[in-house]
Image: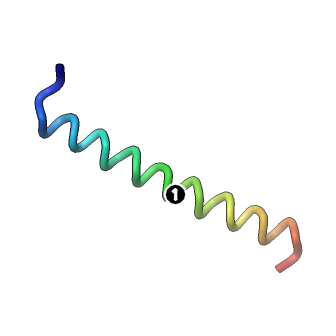
């Protein structure tokens, strides 16, 4: 079991990564559609 602060950091980092991936995906879709 991980210490709480490490688990919290990993969880927050995965949320940031998901957000970044969504932004990149949205930009890619916008560029593909010519917006």
Please tell me which residue is depicted at 59% across the width and 64% down the height of the picture: 23
Q: Circle 1 — which element?
A: helix
**Residue at the outermost bottom position:** 35
Q: Position of residue 8 (x, y in %)?
A: 21, 43
Can you tell which quarter of the image residue 7 is in? top left
Q: Position of residue 35 (x, y in %)?
A: 82, 80
Most foreground residue, 33 or 4: 4
Q: Position of 16 compared to 11: left or right?
A: right
Q: Position of residue 32 (x, y in %)?
A: 86, 65
Q: Is residue 32 above or below residue 18?
A: below
> Where is the N terminus found, in terms of image quarters?
top left
Q: How many marks?
A: 1
Task: Report which residue position mark 1 lands on.
Answer: 20
Q: Is residue 8 left or right of residue 16?
A: left
Q: Residue at x 34, y 47 (%)?
A: 13
Q: Is residue 30 left or right of residue 23?
A: right
The answer to whether 16 is drawn above or below residue 4 in the figure is below
Q: Is residue 9 above or below residue 16?
A: above
């Amino acid at each position: 079991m991980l210490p709480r602060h490490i688990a919290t950091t990993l969880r927050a980092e995965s949320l940031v990564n998901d957000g970044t991936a969504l932004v990149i995906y949205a930009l890619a879709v916008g560029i593909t559609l010519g917006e």
